[in-house]
Image: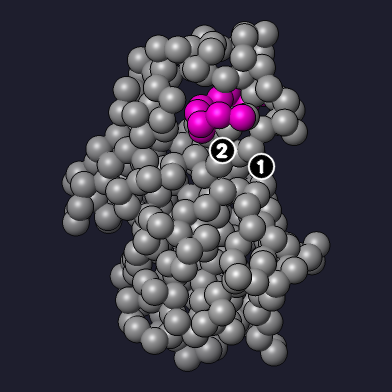
Amino acid sequence: MPIARFSAGGPPRLGKVFEDFLIDLTVAAPAAPSDLVAFLRMGEEALAEFRRVGGDSPGRHALADVQLHAPSPNPEKYLAIGMNYADHSAEAKALGVDVPQWQTWFNKQVSCIHGPFDDVISPRVSEKMDYEGELAVVIGKACRYASPEQAPAFVGGYMIANDVSARDWQARTGTVTLGKSFDTHGPTGPWLTLPEEIGDPHRLEIRTFVNGEVRQHASTADLIHSIWDQISYLSQVMTLKPGDILATGTPAGVGVARKPPVFLRPGDVVRVEISGLGRIENRVIAEA
């Protein structure tokens, strides 16, 4: 069962999700931390407490009665890989963007992280706001110089991300960081699904909808660089730490590549679904 970060008339805390309800871990497993990073750092001890919680444990809340928050709200790093699906690389190449030889990573400032069902702001300074549905990995324990074979042991769980992008700002600099880091442009969730529940993360279906219309539809089997290769590659450079978020790439179908390009406007609703992980859904609103 997934781990949700939620609130119900109080500060955010962790819960164990069962279909249409969750169990508050602060009630049912008080020895477990109420913060996800602390939970991941505790490792097997926290997971053992989590696994002991059943659907009949105290602290039950209907999902309809709680607010779900970004599972990992304050990671040290939020990194995303560019052009990691062959079809997306092809549409980028058609727009004049060079296809990289190596894994190409960029930073999304952690201040952009946002809730799975919260409104996303259309900036007054951008006319080219776009969507990118992605599978996100949350690191579970510190990782340095990991091989691809070792990489699975460092995964804390999986969730959905929308790498919202201001394309006009993205194009202003080769780092693309500014165009990827506007406030609210990092919705994630709806919860963290443990690796044991997913099995092979390279066999998941991903779909992005805008106002109910399918815009992206692919499988993580189509990743150019596998999740294990991604973790290994990054860990040659830096220590990946518990709670760090890695967005693993978006498939074809982004708004900027449509003919003509179609960008998000206030009132649009973007929904990203990944099999086994649930969905996130965000309405676009104008900046006040």
The tag earlier along the polypeptide, 2 or 1, is 2
Q: Residue 173 appears in which quarter of the rendering?
A: bottom left
Q: Is residue 223 visible?
A: no
Quadrant the C terminus occupies: bottom right
Q: Work out whether residue 41 or residue 84 is closer to the camera in this orientation and state it.
A: 41
Within the magenta stretch, is there residue 132? Answer: no
Q: How crowded is mark 1: few (under 14 residues within 10 Å), some or many (20 or more)?
A: some
Depth check, mark 2 against mark 1: the one in front is: 2
Residue ID for mark 2: 191
Label 2: state its secondary structure: strand
Q: The magenta stretch spans which residues?
A: 9-18
Q: Which amino acid does label 1 sit on?
A: Gly
| Residue 177 in view, yes or no | yes
Q: Are marks 2 and 1 in contact (CB under 8 Å)?
A: yes
**In this figure, which residue is indicated by the disc labeled 1?**
278
The N terminus, quarter of image = top right
Q: Is residue 256 above or below residue 187?
A: below
